[in-house]
Every structure is written in structure tokens, then in C-alpha cells.
Image: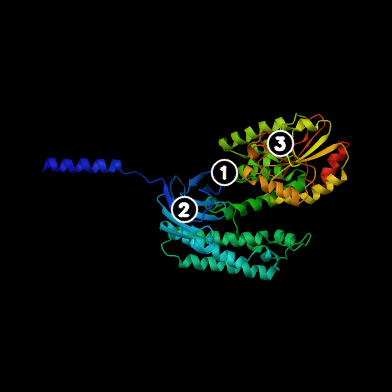
Amino acid sequence: MRKIGLFIAILTIISCKQETTIDYAILSGKIANISAGEFTFNSLDRSIKKTIEVAEDGSFVDTLTVKEGVYIIYDGKNRASVNLNKGDNIEINYDANDFENTLTFSGIGSEINNYLAAKSKKEAELMGEGIGIYLLEEDAYKTKISEIKSSSEALLNASSGVSEDFKAKEKRNINYAYLSMVDKYELYHGHYAKKKDFKVSEGFLNELETITYDNEEDFLASSVYENLVNSHYQKEAAKLAENESVSEDVAFLKTAAKITNETIKNKLVYVNSKYGITYTNELEDFYSAFMAASTNEENKKEITESYNKLKTVAKGMVSPKFEGYENFKGGTTSLDDLKGKFVYVDVWATWCGPCKAEIPFLKEVEAKYHGKNIEFVSISVDVEKDHDKWKAMVSEKELKGIQLFSDKNWESDFVKGYLIKGIPRFILIDPNGNIVSSNAPRPSEKKLIEMFDENNI
């Protein structure tokens, strides 16, 4: 008996040692009519990025190391949100040609995803297409977004198999989404209804006063809440910028530095600096403000690397070069070919809305300076598969100046040399190939003509 008891005890110990904590999720399914043999899987903050292969019959399966949260899958045409947690085993199925009506989730963890899919579909139905909702007057707008909120709450309450913890967090998230719509109305209505200097009536924004901006749990769990917090401190920064005559990007960092919650502070100063430092016109002040605000050593290291890189493209430094870029009119063009003239560079892409919005203004500036000592160069960073799309757009929109197609899109030496992380980006180079401004004003800005005048162009 003693030997049997000992044997059982040993087996128990071995079994305990063999138990492992599941730190992954399994994602599988089938996508009918997918055009590519893969799709991308990304976390909202893009800290997790992966390409998942799809078989010829549309099926796929992958094991993913995840932390709880929402991820985005994109097949080149459709975008789906997937809530994943460790231990989930979720199957996704849909027809790429009828995404809205065929998307389904099954398996462990599917209940939350079916709720989120239903919520998204209902929101889209109530929001309507295009910008229509933002053209509504205040009362109608409030009624509409209240209806969206109520419908989401009803779907949540009717969902089975969803934990009470998730329901509590999601109910707060639904409320944040509503408040976010309240927050953005003034800007969006003024823009789309073409009401210059539009202001909402007194009391319209009162509901925003119910928000506290130091809830770390919601900040980490809800991108909507994070955006509300960011919006709040952006408004505070705008006041500081006006009162102290400092740039708004530097004012934001100084404002965020006073946030007492370290997690919220570090995230906000980082996300506003990762790309912001590549656009600022106050590099030294911006970097100093970031370093004073952040306590995250990894983030400080990354921003310092960007700062050191950007110092090499400061005013007066030799410009990085583009060499042998395909010219729409035939042959190739390099920066050295244009020496002796100022060069105003527009880095853009056919898919970039803000880039295309600058085209009419760019044409006006080009016409005004035609025949003067300046060349206007537009460099597309479209990927190779969109080469024909680039040629078609240049032709259809009758784009002027020198139209070039970069050699390696975002990986081109010229793009990397200027640390370009967002477009459109405008650069002014002098006749000797030296930098006048690595962040020149856009054609739509009056400051561009002022810069041209200062340089006697």
C-alpha cells in the first residue's frame, strides 16, 4: 500500500509540473474570395504586427501570443476587429465579397466578438453613410448619438456567455463613445457644414464634465477613453500655447508633464512625440520638453534616436539625396540634376487624402512661381503594385512640376534620411543642395510664400 501511495504522490507531482499556463490564443477560419494569400494581424497600438498566410481554399490557422484586447485583421479589402484573450480559440469565417452579411465567430471567446460585430453593424446602420450625421443640427445630432448608445447597451445586455467584468467595462466604453461624439461635434459640424468659426450652444458640452481623466484601467482598456483623455489635454495645451506664445506641440508636452498618473502621462507624451518630433519646427524645445515629461526609459531612448537623426537634417545641413527616380515624363531624375535652383519637394501617395487635398493649392503656387528659380518636385511613396495607379492619377489630375516615383517607397534613402513617418511632407532645398526647411509649410499655408520671399525666390 505504501508503494502504491508513493506512486500516486509521484504522479501527482509530475502532473503539477507538467501543467503550463496558456499564454496564447488560436485564430483560425476561412475567408472566401480573398484576393491575396495572406492578411495582416495588428494590435491597435501596432506593438503586435503579424502576417497570417491563407491557403488556396481560404483557410488559415495561427497561434498568437497576445494580451487581452482588440486586434485588427485586414485582408486588403475588409477590416475586422477581433477581441482576443489568452486561451481563446476563435474561428472566423466570412466572404470577402459580402463581408458585412457573412462575418461570423465561433469557438472559445466568440461570444464577445459576436457582440462586437453586431454592435459595429448596428452603429453603421444608425450612423448612415458619409458625413450626413455631422450635418445634423444640435438637437437632431444628440438624438441620433443617444440612439446609437442605447442600441449598443441593448445588444450588450442581451449577449449571453459574456462575463460581467467585460459587460461593466464595455458599458463604460459605450458611454465614452457617446461622449466622444459629443466632443467632436463642434469641429466636425463646422467643417462639413462649412460654418466658419462655428461654436456649439451653451450647455451642449456639459456632459463632458462627468469625465475624469485619470482612470488607468479604462485608459488601457478603451481606445475611445484614451482619445478623450488626449483630446482634453490637447485643448489644455492650446490654451497654454496662446497664453505663453509657444508652439502647440511643445505646449502639449508641457501640459502632459503635469499628469500625475505615470502610465497615462508616458503613453500620451510618447504617442504625440513618436511622429510629432518629425514634424516640429522647434526640435530642441520639443526634445527637451519630451525628456522632462517622460519617465519611460525605452521611450526616451527611441525619441533620442529620432532627435539625433533629425539634427542631421536641420537648416543648413546637406540634404539627403534621391537618385535615379522614375520621371513620369520619361527617364529618371536625381536631386543633383536640379542644382542651381531651389527645390520644393512634396512627398505624397495616391491613397493619402490630405496629400490630394493639397493638389489645388500646389498647382496655384507652381503657376505663381513658373519661370522663377525654383523646381517643384512631387515624390510618390506608393508601393510598386500601385505604380500604374500613380501614373493614372498624375495624368487624370494633370499634376504639374516634376513627378517622380520613389525607388523603395517608405524604405527609400531620401525618405529615411528625412525620417519621414507621415505624409504629406514638404521640404525646401536651396540651390547648393542644402536644407532650408525639412518641414516646410504646405502649399495651402500662407507661411510658404513668406518662406519663399525670405529666400528671394
| Element on which disc 2 rests | loop
Image spot of residue 373 (x, y percent): 87, 36
Q: Residue at x 57, y 43 (%)?
A: 262
Query: What amino acid does circle 2 point to?
Result: Gly
In whole angstroms, how far apart are the C-alphas of marks 3 and 2? Answer: 38 Å
- Residue 172 sits above or below residue 311 on the image: below
Specify the farthest residue to the front. Answer: 330
Task: Estimate how packed mark 2 is, as few (under 14), some (14 to 19) or many (20 or more) residues with alpha carbons within 10 Å.
Answer: many
In whole angstroms, how far apart are the C-alphas of marks 1 and 2? Answer: 45 Å
- Residue 37 sits above or below residue 96 on the image: above
Give the tally of numbered discs.
Answer: 3
Mark 1 or 3: in front is 3
Instruction: Indicate which disc residue 325 carries.
Output: 3
Q: Which residue is mark 1?
A: 262
Query: What amino acid does circle 1 point to?
Result: Glu
In whole angstroms, how far apart are the C-alphas of marks 1 and 3? Answer: 46 Å
Query: What amino acid does circle 3 point to?
Result: Tyr
- Residue 51 sits above or below residue 417 on the image: below
Task: Estimate how packed mark 3 is, as few (under 14), some (14 to 19) or many (20 or more) residues with alpha carbons within 10 Å.
Answer: some
Q: Which residue is mark 2?
A: 58
Q: Earlier in the sequence, mark 1 or mark 3?
A: 1
Image spot of residue 121 (x, y percent): 55, 64
Task: Estimate how packed mark 1 is, as few (under 14), some (14 to 19) or many (20 or more) residues with alpha carbons within 10 Å.
Answer: some
Image spot of residue 446 (x, y percent): 83, 47
Quadrant (top left/top right/bottom left/bottom right) for the N terminus: top left
Instruction: Indicate which disc residue 88 carries.
Output: none
Image spot of residue 261 (x, y percent): 57, 46
Quadrant (top left/top right/bottom left/bottom right) for the C terminus: top right
Q: Earlier in the sequence, mark 1 or mark 2?
A: 2
